[in-house]
Image (cartoon, coloured by chain):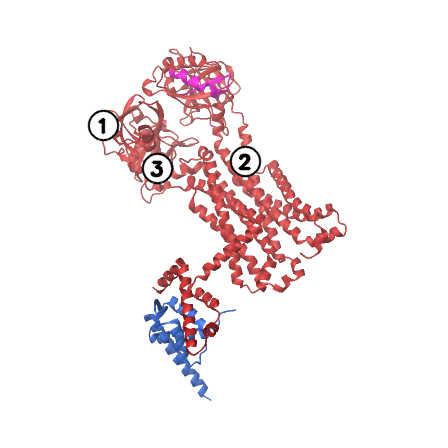
Chain colours: A red, B blue
Amino acid sequence: MAMLRKATNRLHTLADRGRFESDLDDEMRFHLEMEAAKHVERGMSLGEAGALARREFGQIDRFKDEVRDARGVTWLDDLRRDLRFGLRSLRRSPGFTMVAVLCLALGIGANAAIFSVLNAVLLRPLPYAQPDRLVRVYETSGPRTQSSASFADFHDWQQQSTRFESLAAWLEASLTLQGTSEPERIKLVAGTAGLFPLLGVRPLIGRTFSPEHAEPANGQVIVLGEKLWRRRFGGDPSLIGRAIQIDGSPYTVVGVMPASFDFPPNAAADAWGLFDPSPAVRQARGGGFLAVVGRLKPGVSVAASAAELRPIMSRLEKQYPVQAGRGVNVLSLRETVVGTSRPALLVLLGAVGLVLLIACANVANLLLARAAVRRREVAVRLALGAGRARLVRQFLVESLVLALAGGLFGALLAGWSLWALTPLAQSALPIAGGIPLDGRVFGFLLLISALSGLAFGIVPALQASREDVRGTLNDAGAKATAGGGQQRFRNALVVLEIALSLVLLVGAGLLLRGFFHLSGTPSGLVAEGVLTAHVSVPDARIKGATIRLFQPMLERVRQIPGVRSAAIVSLLPIQDAWTNGSYKVEGRPEPLPGQKPNAELRVASPDFFASLGIPILYGRDFTEGDGGLGVRRVIVNEALARQQFPGENAVGRQLRIDKEAPHTIVGVAGSVRQAGLDEEPLPEIYFPYTQVGAENWLGEGVLVIRTAVAPASATAAVRRAVQSIDPSLPLFRVATMEEVIAESLAARRLNLWLLGIFAAIALVLSAAGLYGVIAYLVAQRKREIGIRIALGAQTREVVGLVMRQGGGLTAAGIALGLLGALAFTRALASLLDGVSARDLLTFSGVAALLAAVALLATWIPARRAARVDPMLAIRNE
Amino acid sequence: MSSTTTDLLQGTLDLLILKTLSLGAQHGWGVAQRIQQTSRDLLQINQGSLYPALHRLEEQGWIDSEWGVSDNNRRAKFYRLTADGQAQLDRETESWRQYAEAVRWVLQSA
């Protein structure tokens, strides 16, 4: 209680300082007047009485100070004074201040930004109820560990497993939203009835689906996402219960989900629908197209749930031979979201740590150097009677000001870099929405920097107050080194900085080489001058689409001036996920179940290969006539031909796909790296789009148009051509082929940028650190250098003298750094494509770069040393 | 360059102030007069050092202050003893008594 009253008293005093001071003044003045009056009564004159009273009172100001001390207001005055003094001394050495603040800002700011990105990807909780209990259930087939499941399997899991609280399945589809405004593509996630209850997120308005709620027998229902609802429907709540047109069918809107909700994670889905499988889909086995999510019962581990599902799959394998070789794989939902980006992010985390370390080392170095320079000042002040505690506190305040300034600029830098990095990051990482600057991270970094600043800031004060004051004030004292120990420590810091920079630079260099290697990899097609555009035809109208829509469409497009050729394909290489199936070579013995060869299946129109610059190695391209009744022709790619018909000509051979009649190979096309530039080409089978049933695969086809002019300029004309055939068909995901390839490299490019930036920062900081140390050494030896010059030493000799010192530090740093790099780059191995983690060229190149920079940082103060006026140097400073 | 009173004297001064105020509320000058009178001028202190002591005692909650009007119609700050202060006074008085007793005892034994 007493403490509380004490605290409030203090606050009152501080709050109304003016009143406190005037009261104090009044009180003492009263005393003096009474005392003087007493003397006057005894017969003294007024003047004498006043003088006597004052004399007997003692020094008023001293007692006022003691009162202020007793009241606890002195600390505030002291603080204010320390602050002013600190700011002034920082202003007087602008070079030091700027460099120190810059180092801190770089260390704090850039790192805070990266940590925020990491937080957004790795740490942000998923927007569902108890997300840690959510898992993804995949089927496995051969080398594929994350395959889609069939509805029948999913249903069996639901019925037979006990370790899941619930299971749900979904698939994604792109559909066209029609209506009064322009038709628009939306991403629809169609899920089983149990999906929303499993996720446990409440809708913004209306309701979601659930197994209990019986949906109307006619028509379909849909739950909109808030973004779509606001953008397209103006956030109209009366939309609930009304129907909207999607792909020609009415969907009744039953609810809206809040903008913070997205499922599957980071999919940017526009709306959610109910998945109602047809009887054929319900029974199909041997692989499917569904994604499955499950909620584990409390206390059940991921491994335990997988262990329960595996025997179920084995049973199914025996029951249905077509399931042969299919297993099950369970991963936590978070893992699936984060998994692929984790290695890269962890590497960045390492880089972040290194840069912070270098920045702190630099600041420490700067402060120590400055302290050494101020030893004289400290000694003088101690001699004049300043209290040691007071001095320490003052240095602390100065360091704190520095840290806060660094923090302020760091915040600005962080904000700016997040703004600049976000688009780049979003294209490569699973982030939806903006990346906020993580306050906790920023505070943590600020704390570290402040602490290191404080620690190295008070060292001089503590040290100075202990040593011989007189010694320092002597002439000779100015020459004495600031303790060999301290100098060695500073040298060690610089060596460490150089080493760390080398590690970062090597990492960045390796990534750079890997990136160029990858982007230089021949893709198998010619990307220049090709425009691609997606066109989708709703299921209801896909029958006969080839004749009705695609053929006239392509005809129109070919007539656009500047277009050399045009075609349509079911999936664009490099951009899209694959659809594969198994096949069998005709005339060969039946392969064992689970060992049937797999190939990517595609549907293409004639001219497809020519449009993408894929060579036809043997045989011929499709013609429009390759799809008549009874005609079954395919084109395979070179990878398949090599696999199945090594050394022979594949043309004329036959393949059997599913249970249909055999298909004849009429051509062999060059292989394309469909799955990405870092993967080997997969075997492919192409069907002509005129073949019976092939058009079903073109529900979302891609137009491939080779132009003589810049491809982007043809976009409007192509759109007009397509809409002249059918205005309700939107054209979307329009991009040049070069852009498609570039986007596939986006993740790598991001890593490269980030690591490169860090390496550059590290280089700059280390160079600055080295420069500072050498400059200080030169200042220390000014006298000696002056004497040497006076004795006739040449500029060259002096420069050499100084640079030898710098060179020694640099060499040590590089050696240490090379060792560190060998260890660090092992962690990078998974991110390097085709480049060894011990690539000699990179290592030696970086070492040379660092040596050159260090040389420069040493040379500048060395040159200055050589220009020292010997007379000035020998005389006392 | 530290304050005029050593720790020992500071404690003594505090005690004297508390004792004086136990006899009734008083302003700073009044306390000074009282101490001079009752100690028969034996205890000479710089009058100014009274004020840090008063403020310190008030910070510790043993005395309270209030602005009022003096006998001669001047504005003055009056101090009075609090309950905590009274308890402190009793404690200090007792320990002084014991101390004086012990010293007397030591001096008496030859």
Identify the amino acid type marked 2: Leu
Residue A639, position in %: x, y? 49, 23
On the same chain: label 1 and label 3? yes
Q: Please check the rendered image and state whether residue A208 is part of the magenta-colored stretch, yes or no.
A: no
Residue A795, position in %: x, y? 73, 46
Q: Mark 1 points at which residue?
A: A216
Q: Point out the frontmost of discs 3 and 2.
A: 3
Q: Please check the rendered image and state whether residue A717 is part of the magenta-colored stretch, yes or no.
A: yes
- Label 3 element class: loop
Answer with mark 3 or mark 2, whichever residue precedes in sequence. 3
Q: Name the residue under label 2.
A: A511
Residue farthest bottom in this picture: B110
Give me the C-alpha separation between circle 1 and circle 3.
28 Å
Residue B89, position in %: x, y? 36, 75
Residue farthest right in this picture: A792
Chain under numbered label 3: A
Q: Point out the frontmost of discs 1 and 3.
A: 3
Answer with mark 2 or mark 1, whichever residue precedes in sequence. 1
Image quarter (top left, top right, bottom left or bottom right) of the C terminus of chain A: bottom right
Chain under numbered label 1: A
- Mark 3 crowdedness (10 Å alpha carbons): few <14, some 14-19, many ≥20: few
Q: Mark 3 points at which residue?
A: A260
Give the side of residue A528 with respect to residue A119, left or right. Answer: right
Image quarter (top left, top right, bottom left or bottom right) of the N terminus of chain A: bottom left
Residue A848 at least partly seen: yes
Q: Say if A856 sits above or below A77 in the image.
A: above
Residue A692, position in %: x, y? 37, 15
Q: Which residues make up the magenta segment?
A: A701-723
Residue at 68 percent of width and 47 percent of height: A864
